Structure formats: C-alpha cells, structure tokens
C-alpha cells in the first residue's frame, strides 16, 4: 500500500511494569515490544514510520535507521504525542496511529483499516472492538445513524456517565486520519478531563463539528489489539504471539511434538521436515535447516544449523553446525564453535571457540577450547585443552586422523600432527610429529607389601 505514514506512540514511562527498562523495550519472543508495530507498519507498506519517544530518548538506539523519532517532552497525553510527530507527516498522505505497547497488530489489519478509511472517505476512522467486559477502555459513542460522535475515557471517576460506561464498543487506540485535517483538529483539543491530558480521540468531535465524517472499523479479533500495561499483560501477549509463531512454522512443514513445551523466538528460521522435541527453546536469530531433530530439552541461541543435524539435551550458543552433525546428550557448544559435516560432540562435552573438522568425534567427558581439529580425528574421554595460561588464551592444533587417548591434557600452544597418537593419561606440553605417539607421564612404580605395612585401623 503506497502513500501511507504510521505514527507509533511510545513515550509513556510504563510505570506499571515496575522496571528500570522502558516498557516498549521489554522483550517479546526475541524482539523488543516496539519492534512489533514497526514491522507491522512495514508489512502494511508504510513509506514513513515515526516513533514518538519520551524526554529520556531511550528508543533511538533500538530502532532501524529508516524510522524517524519524535520527542514528546512532557507526558501530556496521546493527542500531544501525535502533535509531536506532526512535522514528520505529509499532509496529503493518510496516517495510521498505533501504540508501541500493542504488539500483535499485523500488516493485514493495518491495511484493512486504511481500506475502510478510504472507502468511507472519512476524515478519521477508528479501529474498535466489541467486548463483554470493556474494563478501562474508552467507550465509543455513536449517533442515531451509527456515526461516531466521540470516545469517552474511563480512566478516572467522572470521565464517563453510567450510560457511557455501559457501552461495549471500545476504542482500541488505533486510528487512520487524513493527515492535513488531523493537524488542524489537534489545535482544538483541550485537556478537559480528570488527568488534564490531551486525548487523541478528542479530535473526533472537532472533526465532526467541522463537517467531516468519522468512521469506525470493527476489529473481529481482539487479540490483535491487546495492550501491555504490566508483566501479567506481557505474559498474556507472549502466549498469543508464541501460538502465532508456532502455527506459522507448522504450516511450513515443521513438526512441533508438543507446542506447549516449546518456545520459538520470532526471528527463528526452521526448515521443512525438521522435528522439534518437547522442552526445546529456540532463541534469537537461530537458523535450522531441513530434516533435523532438535531436542528434547535443548536450547539454541543464535545458532546456525544446517541439514540432518541431531541435537539432544544440549545448549548451543552462537555455534555453527554443518550437515549431519550430532550433538549431545548433555553437551555445551559455546560461541565461536564450528562443527563440520558429520562431526560428533557427545555426552558431557563442552566446546568453545573451536573448529572441528569433518567426521571428528568427541564422544564424551571432554573440553575443547580454542582448538582446531582435523577431519576424522577421535578425541578420547577426559581430554582437555589447557588453553589459558592466566595471561593469554592459546590455541591447540590437532591434525587429521589423529587419535587422542583418554585422559589427555593438551597444554596450549601445542600441535598434534596428522595421524599422531597420544598415550592415555598424558600431559602433552610439546608438539607431537605426524604419525608419532606422544607419551607424557611418569613410569608406574609398584611398592610391594604396602598393604602389610598398614595397621588394622589404617586399613
């Protein structure tokens, strides 16, 4: 949809969140709240997006470069917030006003509102809902012909009459305006309410008195307009957002064995025929290919996973896994880790900032940090790289087709050559040439008759 501006109101302090973090920066499925209406505006085809921030200017660093920021210097209501954004708006282009704490609005819903606005040839079109329990929402007052007269706020006693409180049609806080007429009408808004604030809905009577039509567009799905006032609201919204994300993945050919025990962030990508087992959490910008099995009880954060990968009972943080890799159970892949094709990281293995070549096997009980391991090498149980000398992190290099025996300590910087071996229980401090066996342990000495020297109590 061309020729559309969107203003997103996000200047409120959000005191009911009881947080030092601004409300619209609280995360929702991997994105801050404010990002959701911004992306919805883009999906609707908005050419200009303006976010209204407060005097703390907390949002600028969290918004895309092509989103303009307007500052409302004092908390004087939604009408004053829109006035702060007025200089960014083209007078001949329709403008949609959204709230930064209403994250579930979609591009389709915005387009439907603008379509209704254009069809009605109205100066203003408000999105409304019909609720059985309107609570603290502003009530929509219509005339005998069904036209919108005004919105009555209900935040404080005295704002609305009992008859107005009984109305079930409510204002969602989402509007579409003729931008030029809106700027004029804002000059007529007065703070005649219990809070002494300038309410955006008060432009509707001003537009009506000037002879312009005011339309309403009823939103059938109230979930789209759910707002976040506190952390309980955030949890409710998160549940709806998560169901939406799950449904999108399942419709694209992903199996979620138990969606109720699975969390997936909004920017996660999952390929067709991948199975997500229960207790799995996919976060950040994780990308998973096709025909993978992820879980149960696994967490992936910003991971890049190719095709036919298996990850069970593991934590994978910013690691890259190539086709056919297997991880777990009970493994930890830390940032900077890369597993090449068919590499295996097994039970109780931790890998950090290391590159494991094609077909490498680290089956169990090992730690590899700052290491480069050549293809087809096998790492025995209990192997560690001693990569830190209390000043620097040093690298270990292990060649192709090497065999590192159990309980080997590799004291970096050190190199194990292609096809080389280490003896079990060795502490390797010097390079092992290709094809050689590195032995670094004391000879065994048996003390004969040692048990006979002990008194019965010592035994």
Image (tube, rainbow, N blue to C red):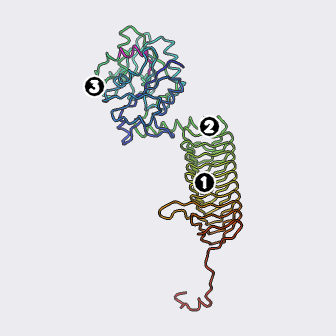
Quadrant for the N terminus, please. top right
In the rendered image, residue 179 lying in the magenta stretch gets the answer yes
The percent coordinates of residue 336 (x first, y second) are 57, 51
The percent coordinates of residue 130 (x first, y second) are 46, 23
At 67% from the left and 37% from the top, the residue drawn is 253
- At mark 3, the secondary structure is loop
Residue occupied by mark 3? 196
150, above or below 380, in the image: above
The percent coordinates of residue 105 (x first, y second) are 50, 28
- At mark 2, the secondary structure is helix
Lower position in the chain sequence, tag 2 or tag 3: 3
Residue occupied by mark 2? 249
Tag 1: Cα neighbours inside 10 Å, few (<14), some, or many (≥20)? many
Tag 3: Cα neighbours inside 10 Å, few (<14), some, or many (≥20)? few
Please report contact status of discs 1 and 3: CB closer than 8 Å, yes or no.
Answer: no
Q: In this view, does 340 lie to the left or right of 245?
A: right
Please report contact status of discs 2 and 1: CB closer than 8 Å, yes or no.
Answer: no
Lower position in the chain sequence, tag 2 or tag 1: 2
446, above or below 380, in the image: below
215, above or below 300, in the image: above
Residue placed most toward the observer, 151 or 270: 270
Residues in magenta, as a range = 175-185
Residue occupied by mark 1? 313
Q: How far apart are marks 2 and 3 (CA)?
A: 47 Å
Q: How far apart are marks 1 and 3 (CA)?
A: 56 Å
Q: Is the magenta stretch mostly helix, strand or loop?
A: helix
The percent coordinates of residue 233 (x first, y second) are 44, 37
Residue placed most toward the observer, 163 or 256: 256
In the rendered image, residue 349 lying in the magenta stretch gets the answer no
């Amino acid at each position: 949809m061309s020729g559309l501006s969107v203003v997103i109101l996000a200047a409120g302090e959000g005191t009911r969140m009881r947080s030092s973090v601004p409300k619209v920066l609280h995360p929702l499925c991997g994105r801050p709240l404010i990002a959701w209406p911004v992306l919805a505006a883009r999906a609707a085809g908005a050419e200009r997006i303006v976010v209204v921030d407060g005097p703390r200017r907390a949002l600028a660093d969290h918004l895309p470069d092509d989103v303009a920021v307007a500052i409302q210097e004092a908390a004087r209501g939604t009408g004053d917030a829109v006035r702060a954004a007025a200089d960014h708006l083209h007078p001949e282009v329709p403008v949609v006003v959204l709230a930064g704490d209403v994250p579930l609005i979609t591009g389709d819903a915005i387009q439907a509102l603008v379509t209704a606005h254009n069809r009605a040839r109205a100066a203003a079109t408000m999105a409304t809902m019909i609720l059985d329990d309107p609570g603290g929402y502003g009530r929509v007052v219509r005339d005998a012909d069904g036209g919108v007269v005004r919105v009555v706020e209900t935040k404080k006693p005295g704002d609305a009459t009992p008859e107005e409180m009984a109305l079930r049609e409510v204002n969602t806080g989402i509007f579409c305006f003729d931008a030029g007429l809106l700027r004029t009408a804002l000059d007529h808004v007065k703070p005649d309410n219990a809070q002494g604030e300038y309410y955006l809905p008060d432009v509707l009577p001003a537009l009506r008195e000037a002879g312009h039509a005011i339309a309403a567009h009823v939103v059938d799905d109230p979930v789209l307009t759910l707002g976040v006032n506190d952390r309980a609201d955030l949890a409710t919204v998160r549940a709806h957002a998560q169901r939406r994300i799950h449904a999108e993945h399942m419709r694209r050919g992903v199996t979620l064995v138990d969606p109720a025990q699975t969390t997936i962030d909004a920017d996660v990508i999952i390929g067709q025929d991948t199975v997500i087992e229960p207790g799995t959490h996919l976060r950040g910008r994780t990308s998973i290919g096709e025909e993978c099995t992820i879980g149960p009880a696994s967490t992936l954060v910003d991971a890049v996973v190719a095709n036919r990968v298996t990850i069970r009972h593991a934590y994978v943080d910013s690691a890259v896994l190539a086709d056919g890799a297997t991880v777990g159970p009970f493994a930890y892949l830390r940032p900077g880790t890369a597993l090449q094709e068919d590499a295996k990281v097994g039970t109780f293995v931790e890998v950090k900032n290391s590159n494991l070549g094609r077909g490498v096997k680290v089956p169990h009980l090992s730690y590899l940090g700052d290491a480069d391991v050549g293809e087809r090498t096998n790492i025995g149980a209990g192997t560690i790289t001693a990569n830190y000398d209390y000043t620097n992190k040093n690298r270990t290099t292990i060649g192709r087709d090497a065999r590192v025996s159990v309980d080997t300590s590799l004291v970096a910087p050190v190199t194990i050559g292609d096809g080389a071996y280490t003896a079990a229980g060795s502490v390797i401090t010097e390079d092992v040439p290709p094809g050689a066996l590195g032995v670094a342990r004391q000879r065994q000495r048996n003390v004969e008759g040692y048990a006979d020297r002990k008194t019965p109590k010592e035994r």
